[in-house]
Amino acid sequence: MAETAVRPSDAELAELNARFETAPAEAIVEWAIERFGDGLAVGASFGGISGMAILHMVAARKPDVFVFVLDTDYLFEETYETMRRAVRELGLTNVHVFKPKLSHEEQARRYGAALWMRDPDLCCEIRKVEPNRRALAGRTAWVAGLRRDQSEGRASVPIVAWNEKFGVVKINPLANWTEQQTWAYIVRHGVPYNPLLDRGYSSIGCYNCTVPGLPGRAGRWQGFQKDECGLHT
Ligand code: SF4
């Protein structure tokens, strides 16, 4: 059912952020479920551990939460495997895959081969940002797994904010968690995660733009001044 998202006031956002800064992530997730109900969406990449921890936290409380996956056509086979495992093991019942409007071949015909090597921002716009817009249409809130320790650009990410780009309230319950805390959660709860993380990859996106052996998000978009696909900026 399509709903219209309502922008919280600045005062309300300030109060929520102050309160949630010291709250357990699980309490933030519970607030989000209570406040937004079926309007809540969880974006899942099945790449990093934060997203998997979030999926586990939400699914334990609301297994029918609307989960959306952006399938760019360039995902690692291990990412699809992780998705299948997560659906099974976390009991997710409402997972939707969004594909780009252009197939790989159509994109190559229109923009030339290997667009990601020449204009990764345009490639990400076509294969991630536009599908993300469709995924969030009619939703009121979006839960994501951003952490402040992931990159300089994410160092001041708020826990709750109005996201103008997609017209929803965006919630990052793990904003102030560290990588170590997140791994501890994954291990403690036996949450499935992408096996590439055990093979030297720190951040996993499309195989065209991801290399192993570099910390944080440094292995993404090698050779470009870019460490975000445009979903979180
Ligand atoms: S991560 Fe790379 S291949 Fe994937 S959409 Fe962005 S530029 Fe294209």
Image (cartoon, rainbow, N blue to C red):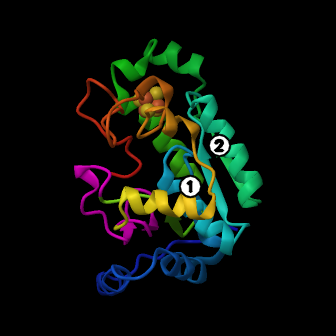
Q: State the mark number for residue 97.
A: none
- Residue at the image position 33 percent from the left and 79 percent from the top: 21
On screen, residue 9 above or below 232: below
> Total number of numbered labels?
2
Quadrant containing ligand 1 = top left
State how far apart marks 1 and 2 are (Cα).
Answer: 9 Å
Give, as a single range, the part of the protein colored magenta.
149-175
Q: Where is residue 93 in the image (x, y as percent from the top left)?
A: 77, 59
Give yes or no for contact between labels 1 and 2 (Cβ–Cβ under 8 Å). yes
Question: Mark 2 highlights which residue?
Answer: 82
Q: Earlier in the sequence, mark 1 or mark 2?
A: 1
Res 136 → quadrant: bottom right
Which of the pair 79/157 is nearer the observer?
Answer: 79
Q: Position of residue 50 (x, y in %)?
A: 48, 56
On screen, residue 129 above or below 135: above
On screen, residue 11 above or below 43: below
Which of the pair 106/78 is nearer the observer?
Answer: 78
Q: Where is residue 178 in the image (x, y as percent from the top left)?
A: 35, 61
Q: Position of residue 68 (x, y in %)?
A: 62, 52
Question: Mark 1 highlights which residue?
Answer: 52
In this rendering, position of residue 72 left or right of residue 171 = right
Which of the pair 54/228 is nearer the observer?
Answer: 54
In this rendering, position of residue 231 left or right of residue 75 = left
Circle 1 — which element? helix
Amino acid carrying label 1: it is Met
